[in-house]
Amino acid sequence: MKILFLNPPTLTGEIYMKELGRCGRKAVAGEFWPQTGLAYLAAVVENQGHEARIIDSMAVGMGIEELIHEVQAWEPSFIVAGTSTPTFLNDAEVLRRLSGSHRVIKGFAGTHVSALPEQSLEQSDADFLFINEAEETVKEVAEVLSKGASESADLGGLLERIQGLAVRTETGICLTPPRPYVANLDMLPYPARHLLPNQAYQMPFFEKEPFVTVIPTRGCPWQCTFCRAGQVWGRRVRTRSIENVLREIQQIRKELGISKIIFMTDSLTLNRQWAKEFFKAIVSANLVFDWICNSRVDAVDLEMLQLMKQAGCKLISYGVESGNQGILDGCKKGIRLEDSVNATKLTRQAGILSMAYFVLGLPGETHETINETIAFAKNLHPDYVNFHIATPFPGTALYEQAVEAGWLTTSNWADYEEEGSAVMCTANLSPEELRRAQRRAMREFYLRPGQLFRELKGIRSRAQLRSRLHAGMRVLNTLFRSK
């Protein structure tokens, strides 16, 4: 069969950072994000002998009319669209327009539809959607459809036998039994990156050079109320073997010639023994590439950071979240303020850049605690920061809390987006006050003379200068916008 994996275009032309295991947000500095999750699904059906294609409409600048033409010309047997909360309504409309021009079986995958499967089918004309991890599920769906089920009038009746789906049937919506997570991640094929527009995936930190994302672990054990990192891949951390990850990196270097990698996981340093052995293995294998990752502030030490530096790590992103311990405790982050101070200090000592992420507007937030967080960010001295607005994504404890307390100001999923949008009105802060606080926090951190001097001092090439200026202008545009 012909199977299309689609990252739909936005009908407004905006660019979003999307991945099947992430919430999704607007790109603020010109980022184009690899569709590694879709590439995993494509690799699975290719291994079955099907013909797979990935269209990443955002990365290649393909609008809806061109996409309709491509679908009509290729005539796929079915389409799997990757979606996220802020893009879901847009993505549903894209699939409706595709249906109007070419009758095709359609499905969704991603965190939003995993959290709200029944509502997602009600708000779209998709025939089915994947709930949580989808590699084994898409394999079974492809097998059923390849046997002629696509011609059956009772498609839902056939698909409802498959675990891990929400299916539209003749009698309504059916949620099939949950599918167990893949126990051994080494058994999965490597993502079908040959189907992706790899040269289009760029971000300012890599000076507009192409980069890929590699997923060495799946699952997140922490219980942060505002996060759904464990929504698609579960709470239990599953870790690939070091040899398996190294072979993927070697393949990327040899076949794609790409030397920039983001390790996309919240648990890279959770198992400290595995992590240290992994970093040592990179050095021993003489693999030369630049990489960045996420980590918790309580999951690093100087020895590990020095190994990371030796293995090519350029930047670590930390979820600091707040400068107020009470808010950290309330959102079940499980860290102390001194953990953030220590991690940032040790990261600087190891010669690695740091990025601190903060969330404004969590339960208990006031004007005073926001000022504490801004002051904490300045005193922390990370190289970069980003202040998000607390967004109650479906599937999180914060969403349930916001629904119960009556905090939500809109049911439009397009507004559930961390960059400049706010959808909660608490007793202490209105959405507009949070938007103003976010812009103020970014301005106060980045427009300090000392911070500007450090940024200029760190520039090593004209390409880096151009990249940083371009990104900086885009960010400044968001900081001074009136809306």
Image: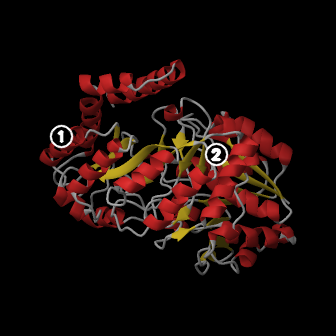
Q: Amino acid at mark 1?
A: Ala
Label disc, if present, on residue 8 of the rendered structure = 2
Q: Residue most toward the top?
A: 462
* Badge 1 density bin: few <14, some 14–19, many ≥20, Cα 10 Å: some
Residue 143: image x %, image y %?
81, 71
User: In this picture, is 432 found above or below 416?
Assistant: above
Q: Is residue 242 left or right of residue 252?
A: left
Which label number is shown at residue 295? none
Q: Position of residue 327 (x, y in %)?
A: 21, 58
Task: Tell me the SS state at disc 1.
Answer: helix
Q: Secondary structure at mark 2?
A: loop
* Left or right of residue 98, residue 459 in this image: left
- Label 1 and label 2: CA atoms lie apart by 40 Å
Q: Would residue 474 appear left or right of 361 to someone viewing this image?
A: right
The quadrant in which the N terminus is found is bottom right
Q: Quick check: can you spot residue 272?
A: yes
**How many C-alpha atoms fall within 10 Å of the one at disc 2: few (<14), some, or many (≥20)?**
many
Q: How many marks overall? A: 2
Which of these two is toward me, 247 or 184? 247
What residue do we see at 60% from left, 63% from top?
242
Task: Indicate the position of residue 436 as horizontal and vertical percent values.
Answer: 25, 36
Picture residue at 43% right of the left edge, 64% below the top: 270
- Comparing labels 1 and 2, the label whose residue is closer to the camera: 1
Q: Nearer the viewer, residue 14 or 64?
A: 14
Residue located at (19% from left, 45% from top): 370
- Mark earlier in primary sequence (1, 2): 2
Specify the amino acid type for callout 2: Pro
* Residue 483, position as x, y percentages in the image: 33, 31
> What residue did someone put label 1 on?
375
Establish if 447 lies above or below 83. above
